[in-house]
Amino acid sequence: MASKVNSSTATPDGVDNGIKGPVTWDDATWILTSAFIIFTMQSGFGMVESGVVASRNTVNIMVKNVVDVVFGGITYWMFGYALSFGQGPYSNPFCGVGDFFVDTDGEDMGLVYATFVFQLSFATTATTIVSGAMAERTNLTAYIVFSLLNTIVYCIPAHWVWGSNGFLAQLGAVDFAGSGVVHLVGACSGLVATLMLKPRTGRYAPGQQWPSLVNPVNAIMGTFMLWWGWLAFNCGSTFGISGGKWMLASKAAFTTLIASMAGGITGTLVSYLSKRGKYDVGYLINSILGSLVAITASCPLVRSYEAVIIGMVGALCTLGCCRLMDRLQIDDPVCAVAIHGASGLWGLLAVGLFVEDDNLEDLTKNRNGLLKGGGFYLLGIQVLTIVCEVSWSMLTTFLMLLLIDNTLGLRVSLEEERLGADFCEHGLRITTLRLSQLLNNPSASHNPLNSRTNPSASHSPLNSRSNLLEASSSEEVLDDRPRKERNGFRPRSRSVSWFDSNPSLGSVQEINIYGDHVRERTLVKTAIKQNVKGSKKSPSTSSAATSPPSKLGNTKRRAVKGSRLENVANIPAQEIQDGSRNDRISDDLIPPSVLPL
């Protein structure tokens, strides 16, 4: 039998610095193990977000997840834990006081440190939710400052609901693992942030179609990482396995899986019906995550069929909120507000409807939900919890971001947004190629491809495709120039490689090669279609344009080692022109309106 530690420090109502009830050695092991698994959810969030944002911002979005832990974690150690679970003489129903700069070497060392590590994983998750809503247009320095301050936004509601003398806890509010404290609070902060930042440039421009997922594989892998992390998130919130806690943990795991399965099925059906037989990956991912958020508040307190209902409704809330925000032109790149906000709100309401009295650990304080004969009291308390958490998080986030915006500047400049945060914030190099030159005028005297182009070759953009592939892998044709010569391009750190533009070509389209991946393959198809159409009307165009060859070039060339553009030379010309093979060359479309001209 496990021996108890620090049982003498438990408060009269059974809450001890965030841990419910006496703690045993086995309980401490359970808490720490769960915390370690929850910590890996940062990787899951990063993978999901990197699957949604443009490739020129993928490194930056991963760095922000690191920032959440590094800077948000240090402020949680300094004062966040104290405001949530401080047990000093000045603690009150609004906030805790005591245990600032957490440190102890007494008999309660194991209890305090285990609790801190577990609660830290929750605090960093709340901040990570906000980073997704702010993606692709936020100044990293400003975001670092926000991560330092966002601890205040999370830790006060945590005290209200989970603190020993929090006023919502005393009223009987139930939020088992944080549908409201973690997810709803984070989503409300994200909503304020995205409203203040405004949409990404060109996001809602007329006629523009933005992809819902840029890298579906990353997003799916991230979903699986979050899925298994969520099991620790919910099961670990029993704060142990002694007594009846292990039974609650088992039930939490069971209902979490059931709800997420129901949510995934719901998203699949909605996608099939609304997309005319297509199974949209984004619908599936968002539905699963939304159902996980919804069940988090009540996972050990509801029956299996109720978990199915909670998961299905959570998925529908997520998908509906995504559609609503899109219509209102509220730009949330990763649907963080819909997933964590709409589903978190529903999760809190579901507690007031479905939960029944817990006779193991008395989590509901002898109260039942409305549908279990408990009347409207618990549902009313849950509504009050929603109002308090939404009001607090939105107000404090607005004040913080307003202060940051007026001092550091919250949003990056237009030039930096076009070039991408990976280059401007981290100095990671991208190569810019002017497609209109390579496809429309490959033998112009000023074109750096002269030495590589046959002067007698046709000017057909189809034949010029080979030139693009060859130029893409050649560093010697690039021309680095000082920042002052870049005609308005002023990234913070270093100039970008580029080709001189031909003024006679009119508007200029471009393709960026980033590391081993080509960012804009759709523009390749667009440029070819436009130029082929024009060549048919031009009397000077060679016969090659009117009678294009069946293949784009006779040889295979690799644009960049490992690039998915490497096989484009073997795609029949007609399939590129009519778009029937768009999947082979289109990934991560960035509308021309956001490109530097």
Image: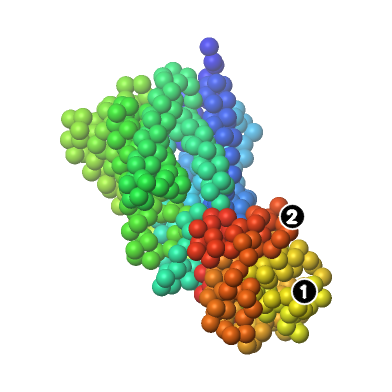
In the image: residue 193, left or right of residue 217: left
Label placed on residue 561: 2
Label placed on residue 14: none
**Between 43 and 316, which is closer to the camera in this rendering?**
316
Residue 483 appears in the picture as rendered: no
In the image: residue 557, left or right of residue 568: right
Mark 1 element type? loop
* Mark closest to the chain's N terminus, 1 or 2: 1
Residue type at mark 2 is Lys
Residue 258 is situated, as x and y percent measured from the top left of the image, at 38, 30
Residue 493 is situated, as x and y percent measured from the top left of the image, at 71, 71
User: As displayed, is residue 7 above or below residue 270?
Assistant: above
Report the mark closest to the observer, 1 or 2: 1
**Between 587 and 569, which is closer to the camera in this rendering?**
569
Q: Mark 1 points at which residue?
A: 453
Picture residue at 34% right of the left edge, 63% below the top = 327
Name the quadrant containing residue 310: top left
Mark 2 element type? loop
Residue type at mark 1 is Thr
**Between 47 and 587, which is closer to the camera in this rendering?**
587
Picture residue at 29% right of the left edge, 39% below the top = 350
Picture residue at 28% right of the left edge, 26% below the top = 357
| In the image, farthest residue toward the top | 1
Picture residue at 82% right of the left edge, 70% below the top = 476
